[in-house]
Every structure is written in C-alpha cells, then in structure tokens.
Image: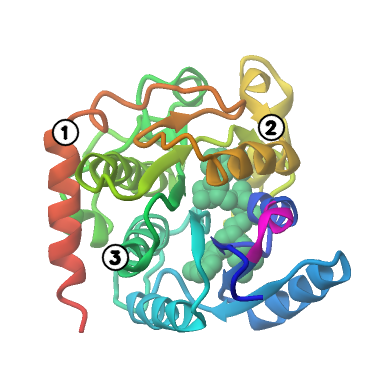
C-alpha cells in the first residue's frame, strides 16, 4: 500500500474538503488531517466503504505545535506524497483566540497552513503539488465582494494580524477583515513559494461562492450564515461566481493531480486562471509576508 502515491488533505470533514476527499481518493491514498477524531473516524468508514485507502491524523491547524506534530506523524507514515491540499479554514464573526493567543481566523487560514507546508515541503518528492484554498474576498476590487461592502485584505503586518488588528476603514460585517487578510497572506505566500522553490509546485484556488458548506457556521450571526450559505449563490451578480462543493472538488482535484508542472497559478471556480489583488501580486509584499510569518512562527518552540 505504501508504494501507492498519497495526498494530504486538511479539513476533509465538511463542505469543500469533504467533497474533495471523495473525489481525490480515486487518485491515491488519502492522509486525512482534521481536528475532530469522531468526524475523522466516520469519514474513514465512509471512504473505506467506497473502497478507498485512508490514514487519519488528528491536528488542530490553528495550533502551531499540533501542526508540527502532525507533520512529523505524516512523514513517519513513509508514503510517497504527490500532493498537499491546505483546505481547512474558518470565517467566524467574533474575534477568537488560538492556543498561541493569536487571532483564530488568521492562525487557521494563514499561519497553520503556512507552518504545515513549511514543515512538509523539504520532505516532499520533486514535482509534488501544494495547493491552497484562497478566497477572492482578499481583493478589494472583486466585484461581488465590493458590492457587499467588503474592502479586501487589511494587512498592517503579520504580527498585527496575529494580534487581530486590521488596517482601518475595513468592512462593516464582523469577521470579514480577519478572513480577507488571512486569505491575502496565504495567497501572497503561495506566489512567494512558487517563485522561490522550483522543486515543488504551488498553486491556489478560489472555489467560488460555494453553498451548502459550514463556512461561517461558527458565526453567531444567522444573517451571515444565510448570506454565504444560500443567498449569494442565487442572486446576480453573485450567482455568476457560485459553485457547489462537488464542482469545487473537481477543480481542486484537477490542480492537485496536474502533471504539467504549472506553479504560481491562481484559478477560479471553473479552473480558469484569475488575477488576485494588486497587493498579493507584488513580489515585495509576498516576500515580506513570508519573512514576517517565519519570524512569528520561530517564536513557537
Ligand atoms: N464556501 C465558500 O463559499 C468559500 C469561498 C471561498 C473560499 N472558501 C474556503 O474553502 C475552504 C473550505 O471551506 P468550506 O466552505 O468547505 O467550509 P466548512 O464546511 O466549514 O469546512 C471547513 C473545514 O475546515 C476544518 N477546520 C476548521 N478549523 C480547523 C482547525 N483549527 N483545525 C483543523 N481543521 C479545521 C473544519 O473541520 P470541522 O469539520 O471539525 O469543523 C472543516 O473540515 C476554506 O479554506 C474556506 O475559507 C470557501
């Protein structure tokens, strides 16, 4: 079994990650990385019943110590890893704190995904695909996000983001600045990784406004839940960007199993290359995000 190539997926227990696990399992052994052991066990049973091979690793992506431990466990499995999907993400409407005392949204969506990637990357075989699930909300010029009063990523510095501080003049909707800035940072890091590490391939995906997931489910704000869960996927102009977990799963699986060697590409919900915000396209900004993130993560022993 260990000769069979393997794919790592974070956040496979719900929404886009769950649909992707079902699709991706057709291509190799899945290493399922999730925080909830009960949900992991159920997912393993579901995939086993479909005839797929899986291994599970319990990990809280927002907790850097848990991420590093999980990376060691994954490497100890000894699988030839063909791809890593950084999918786990949250969008709570209340400011919450991670185990390290950092903003929970920033810790989950940026710091944890970054730390997992850096812990695994040196050990991945040449040509492995590393994929990040981003969000077009990071772009202040993105039409549907703009129409909803979102203002894009509100980056001051990585340290400020970890403290839960965002550039003034942000969105009125609670939690959105944290979410947009976390996605702005992980997208900038994707492009920096792609420029600086030619051995692996780093790409990002905007899955579209995807109904039927639990994103924002941590939120106490029923309106935000309804907005993201249903309304935005149905009414123009938002419906133009709408998708389902199953459609996202196909796009994501195509990028993760791609053998063309493409790197540094950001694709939309239909798998077409798209432009990210001007700021994330700036190599100076990209390198700054990477350097500051490494400095912050180095404080955790
Ligand atoms: N839905 C959209 O419209 C949309 C649009 C753009 C981007 N995205 C991105 O797509 C990705 C998947 O989101 P989704 O919509 O499928 O949401 P979802 O249904 O809430 O799924 C999120 C997944 O992440 C996991 N997760 C959250 N925090 C974690 C932590 N600390 N440690 C480990 N796992 C954790 C969740 O685990 P549990 O099952 O234990 O909660 C769940 O499996 C996210 O990165 C999101 O930002 C979504």
Residue 209 is inside the magenta segment: no
Q: Residue at x 30, y 50 (%)?
A: 199
Query: Where is mark 1, residue-wise?
Result: 283
* Residue 88 appears in the picture as rendered: yes
Q: Earlier in the sequence, mark 1 or mark 2?
A: 2
Quadrant position of the N terminus in the picture: bottom right
Q: Is residue 222 left or right of residue 65?
A: right
Quadrant position of the C terminus in the picture: bottom left
Q: Earlier in the sequence, mark 1 or mark 3?
A: 3
Magenta extent: 24-29
Q: Is residue 110 left or right of residue 26?
A: left
Q: Main secondary structure of the magenta part?
A: helix
Is residue 299 shown above or below 8?
below
* Residue 216 appears in the picture as rendered: no
Figure label count: 3
Q: Is residue 297 left or right of residue 107?
A: left
Q: Residue at x 65, y 18 (%)?
A: 240
- Please state which of residues 121 and 64 is positioned toward the viewer in this rendering: 121
| Ligand 1 has an atom within 8 Å of the beta carbon of the residue at disc 2 | yes
């Amino acid at each position: 079994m260990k000769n069979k190539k393997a794919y790592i997926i974070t956040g496979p227990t719900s929404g886009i990650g769950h649909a992707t696990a079902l699709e991706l399992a057709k291509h190799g052994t899945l290493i399922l990385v999730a925080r909830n052991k009960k949900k992991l066990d159920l997912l393993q049973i579901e995939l086993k019943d479909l005839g797929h091979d899986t291994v599970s690793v319990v990990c809280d992506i927002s907790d850097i110590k848990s991420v590093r431990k999980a990376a060691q466990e994954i490497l100890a499995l000894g699988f030839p890893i063909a791809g890593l999907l950084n999918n786990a993400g949250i969008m709570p409407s209340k400011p919450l704190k991670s185990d390290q005392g950092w903003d929970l949204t920033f810790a989950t969506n940026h710091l944890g995904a970054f730390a997992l990637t850096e812990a695994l990357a040196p050990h991945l075989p040449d040509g492995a695909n590393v994929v990040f699930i981003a969000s077009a909300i990071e772009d202040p010029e993105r039409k549907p996000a703009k129409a909803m009063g979102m203002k894009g990523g509100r980056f001051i510095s990585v340290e400020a983001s970890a403290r839960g501080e965002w550039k003034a003049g942000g969105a009125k909707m609670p939690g959105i600045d944290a979410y947009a800035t976390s996605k702005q940072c992980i997208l900038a890091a994707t492009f920096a990784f792609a420029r600086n590490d030619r051995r692996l391939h780093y790409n990002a995906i905007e899955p579209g406004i995807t109904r039927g997931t639990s994103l924002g489910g941590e939120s106490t704000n029923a309106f935000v839940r309804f907005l993201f869960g249903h309304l935005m996927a149905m009414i123009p102009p938002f419906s133009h960007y709408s998708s389902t977990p199953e459609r996202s799963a196909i796009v994501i699986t195509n990028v993760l199993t791609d053998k063309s060697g493409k790197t540094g590409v950001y694709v939309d919900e239909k798998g077409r290359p798209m432009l990210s915000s001007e700021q994330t396209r700036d190599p100076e900004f990209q390198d700054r995000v990477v350097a500051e993130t490494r400095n912050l993560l180095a404080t955790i022993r």
